[in-house]
């Protein structure tokens, strides 16, 4: 005996496989389960009162099965296959955890690294800053000079300087060296017979073979002015001309210059 699982109608004909009312595959009561040759389908609800509708749908099913087409029960609507979401959720959670771990590590480690760097740098000696070339200069460093407006005040030093200046003066007279006399004589220089600096230099002529000798130097200082007296012997062969002079000097431009010279008895 077979029974329809839908309408629960029993059939004693064992050759039947489908319900004559709705075409549902019959279940064998003897096997306690569905017929081995029957295929379970989900019947669609009847929409008409035609008792042959189920049989027609069952025949159509067997025709499609014989043609190799997949069976779709009457009223069946294919549902779209749903994609699994949990792998994406797991991946996003993993990325979040990894990124959070990096951020947390950075927050913890970076301040420590900075503190360590500051500690190392603080223990280092400061690097000297080179502000000039390490190579020695080819030019000597000039020694500090006396202020142009500040005349020397040491008596012996001034006397030695003026003695050297008188020696240079007489040498320029003998050699006719106008350039040297231009430096020694001040612009306002006045000599014997009120001779000016210009007339002195124009009348200058070399005196070959003449020598000289200084003696009896005496110095008087007054601020930036000096008064020097001395004896000068001019020697030409065996002829000696001894003269006494009184010269005045002024401190100007960092050196002494003669402002006057006159012969005294």
Image: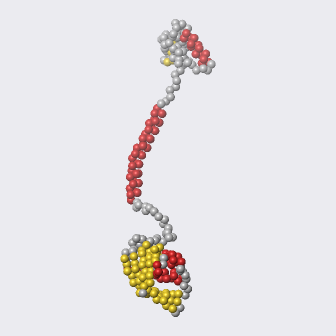
Residue under the image location 40 percent in, 44 percent down = 104
- Percent position (x, y) of residue 235? 50, 89
For the view shown, which residue lies furthest in the bottom direction?
Answer: 238
- Percent position (x, y) of residue 63? 61, 16
Q: Is residue 41 visible?
A: no
Task: Check the image and tell me how it is coloured.
Answer: secondary structure
Q: In this view of the protein, which residue sits in the foreground, 52 or 211?
A: 211
Q: Is residue 78 visible?
A: yes
For the view shown, which residue lies furthest in the front direction?
Answer: 193
User: Where's the C terminus, which quadrant?
Assistant: bottom left
- Percent position (x, y) of residue 149? 40, 70
Residue under the image location 48 percent in, 65 percent down = 133
Residue 159, quarter of picture: bottom left
For the view shown, which residue lies furthest in the right direction?
Answer: 67
Residue under the image location 42 percent in, 75 percent down = 250
Residue under the image location 59 percent in, 13 percent down = 59
Q: In the rendered picture of this protein, how many numbered marks are placed on residues?
A: 0
Say if 50 sits above or below 250 in the image.
above
Say if 139 sits above or below 115 in the image.
below
Q: Is residue 121 left or right of residue 70?
A: left
- Percent position (x, y) of residue 130? 45, 63
Q: In this view of the protein, which residue sits in the foreground, 138 or 149?
A: 149
Q: In this view of the protein, which residue sits in the foreground, 201 or 126?
A: 201
């Amino acid at each position: 005996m077979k029974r329809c699982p839908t309408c629960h109608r029993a059939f004693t004909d064992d050759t039947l496989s489908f319900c004559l009312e709705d075409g549902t595959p019959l279940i064998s009561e003897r096997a306690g389960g569905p017929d081995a040759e029957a295929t379970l389908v989900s019947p669609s609800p009847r929409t008409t009162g035609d008792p042959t509708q189920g049989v027609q749908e069952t025949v159509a099913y067997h025709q499609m099965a014989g043609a190799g087409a997949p069976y779709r029960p009457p009223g069946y609507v294919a549902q779209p296959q749903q994609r699994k979401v949990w792998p994406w959720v797991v991946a996003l959670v993993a990325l979040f955890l990894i990124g959070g771990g990096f951020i947390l590590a950075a927050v913890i480690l970076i301040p420590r690294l900075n503190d360590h760097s500051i500690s190392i740098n603080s223990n280092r000696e400061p690097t000297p800053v080179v502000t000039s070339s390490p190579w020695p200069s080819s030019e000597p460093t000039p020694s500090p000079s006396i202020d142009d407006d500040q005349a020397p005040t040491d008596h012996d030093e001034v006397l030695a300087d003026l003695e050297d200046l008188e020696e240079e003066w007489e040498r320029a007279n003998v050699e006719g060296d106008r350039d040297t006399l231009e430096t020694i004589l001040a612009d306002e220089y006045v000599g014997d017979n009120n001779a000016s600096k210009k007339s002195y230099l124009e009348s200058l002529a070399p005196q070959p073979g003449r020598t000289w000798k200084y003696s009896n130097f005496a110095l008087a200082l007054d601020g930036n002015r000096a008064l020097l007296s001395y004896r000068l012997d001019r020697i030409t062969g065996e002829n000696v001309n001894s003269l006494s002079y009184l010269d005045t000097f002024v401190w100007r431009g960092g050196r002494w210059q003669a402002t006057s010279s006159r012969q005294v008895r």
